[in-house]
Image: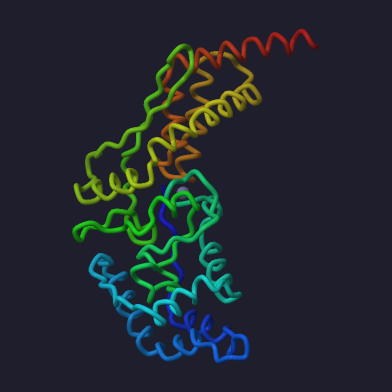
Amino acid sequence: MKNFAYLPAPYFSHFENITNSKKDTVKTQPNEKKNTLLSLFDEIRTKYKYYEDNFDKGKLHLINSTGYIDIKKLSLLDAYTGNGKELDKLKSSIKKLQHQDWQNTCPYCGILSLNSTDHYLPKEDYSEYAVLAINLVPCCLECNNKKGTYWKVNNARTIINFYLDDIPEQEFLTCDLKYEDAIPVARYNLSQAHGISAESFNLIECHYDRLDLLERYKDGSNDEITSTLDSILSFSKDDEPSKIKSDLITNYQKRVSRYGVNHWRCALLKALYNSNEFLDQASSALKVQLVNDMLKI
Ligand SMILES: [Zn+2]
């Protein structure tokens, strides 16, 4: 898990551009939604500033909803769901800011591709921030659906904000690998490592729980274990378990520097290189392959 970069201010110009790009008329009648957005310019400028101030102070949980209803809410939501070119430009500039290792990976889960955009403060309750760049988080559709309008309970945030929250460098996600009927089964756990505050760990637990991450990592592990075995068979030339282990550790270190120590694939790789059963399984498969290769020569 790694932080995401956020678009720098100013933000209100995006709202202006999206509004101004809308048609003046709809079916020969004046575009009521556009006119409503134009009438809200001063209010929204002030609200953006209010969000930005709280964002800068790390106090997003203090932001109250304006509670827009009826045509104002509809018009503000339409600025987003209207899907115009200006909004596409905004979404794409947020994605382009990210490090290339994360340009197409959901920050919320680290599993799936970016094919959706989350409103950190949900647009259903905070329509005024429907197109505010720092409220938009590129993510996968599965995480977006699972998160829904959930982001705060009793004044404490419950979903990690990848723009703002410091992702602990201590290892809090671990993987336990056990062979059951000769098949490796990976299970994931969270633990409050030394140095992680109770508040920070509570946020992590709520985030993982809501997005069902530990189960989703378990589900994704079979394919990952198979591809790790395949890569050992493709690249290793020495069937000694200790040599296989040291190659896996080298890969683990590279992966940690790219994705962070708490990425699920890092936790799994660590469990694999610490499993004597896995190393023996890989060593036996490699031995067979090396003999077959020699026979071919
Ligand atoms: Zn996701």
For residue 280, side relative to residue 146 (left or right): right
**Rendering coords of residue 187 (x, y %):** 38, 28
**Rendering coords of residue 256 (x, y %):** 45, 40
**Rendering coords of residue 225 (x, y %):** 52, 27
**Rendering coords of residue 242 (x, y %):** 49, 17
Looking at the image, residue 265 lies above or below residue 248: below
Residue 135: name its quadrant. Answer: bottom left
- Determine the residue positioned at 32% across, 74% down: 51
Q: How is the image coloured?
A: rainbow
For residue 159, side relative to residue 33 (left or right): left
Residue 64: name its quadrant. Answer: bottom left
Looking at the image, residue 158 lies above or below residue 132: above
Looking at the image, residue 51 lies above or below residue 166: below
- Determine the residue positioned at 48% across, 59% down: 138
Q: Nearer the viewer, residue 221 or 43?
A: 43
Looking at the image, residue 118 lies above or below residue 72: above
- Determine the residue positioned at 33% across, 85% down: 46
The residue most toward the right is: 297
Q: Quadrant of the C terminus?
A: top right
- Determine the residue positioned at 34% across, 44% down: 208
Count of numbered circles on the image: 0
